[in-house]
Amino acid sequence: MKVEAKKEVVKEIAGKLDSARAFYLTDFTGLNVKNMTSLRAQLREAGIEYLVVKNSLAQRAVETLEVPDIAEFFIGPTGLVIGTQDAVSPAKLLTEFAKEHDDRPSVKVAIVEGEIVDAEGIGRLAKLPPKEQLLAELAGAMESPMVALVSMMQAMLYEVAGLIDALRAEKDAAGS
């Protein structure tokens, strides 16, 4: 590959990584073509990109970004999993796929929202509930105090109405 072509590849990879919410470096050793095709299809279906590029080119692309140094992880076969929509979906997909395929691919490291995440952290990310569920839980948590406030205000309104009725009844009794 000529120097200009390499520069263009590095620029393209850097652009994809820069726009990503998270990217994962994986070791795909041990996966056959059928399994790799299946993994790529699952990732693509979820809106996640999977790239296999030369380590030196990927490393140069990462060096142009403002992320922690992960140069030590560019050893052996490396696949880049790029999640642009959210950081959790790629972790979930990779973890679930690895469970079914003898822990392959293995995740070397990830950069999530500009921070380095090790294998243990990736496991914790994969255990998070789906985004929709988290949003529903947040909405529920926000709804509960509001319902309590409305109930309290409604009780006050009933109390004031009761006091007005009592006052009216007292005036009627005093007026007769």
Image (tube, helix red, strand yellow):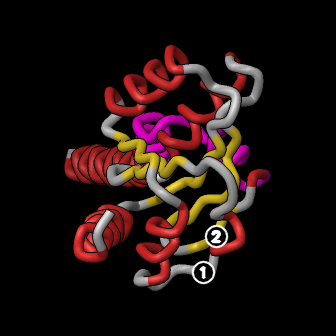
How many marks do you count on the picture? 2
Circle number at residue 68: 1
Most common secondary structure along the magenta stretch: helix
Q: Residue furthest front?
A: 2
Q: Residue at x 32, y 27 (%)?
A: 45
Q: Residue at x 75, y 29 (%)?
A: 103
State the image quarter where residue 97 is shown. top right
Numbered range of the magenta stretch? 120-145
Q: Is residue 94 above or below residue 6?
A: above
Estimate the x, y position of residue 171 in percent, counting from the top left: 25, 53
Task: Assign the N terminus to one quadrant of the image.
Answer: bottom left
Estimate the x, y position of residue 9 in percent, counting from the top left: 29, 65
The reply to whether dot 1 and dot 2 touch (C-beta < 8 Å) is yes
Which three-letter amino acid code belongs to the residue tagged 2?
A: Ile
Q: Who is closer to the viewer here, 174 or 12? A: 12
Estimate the x, y position of residue 60 in percent, counting from the top left: 46, 77
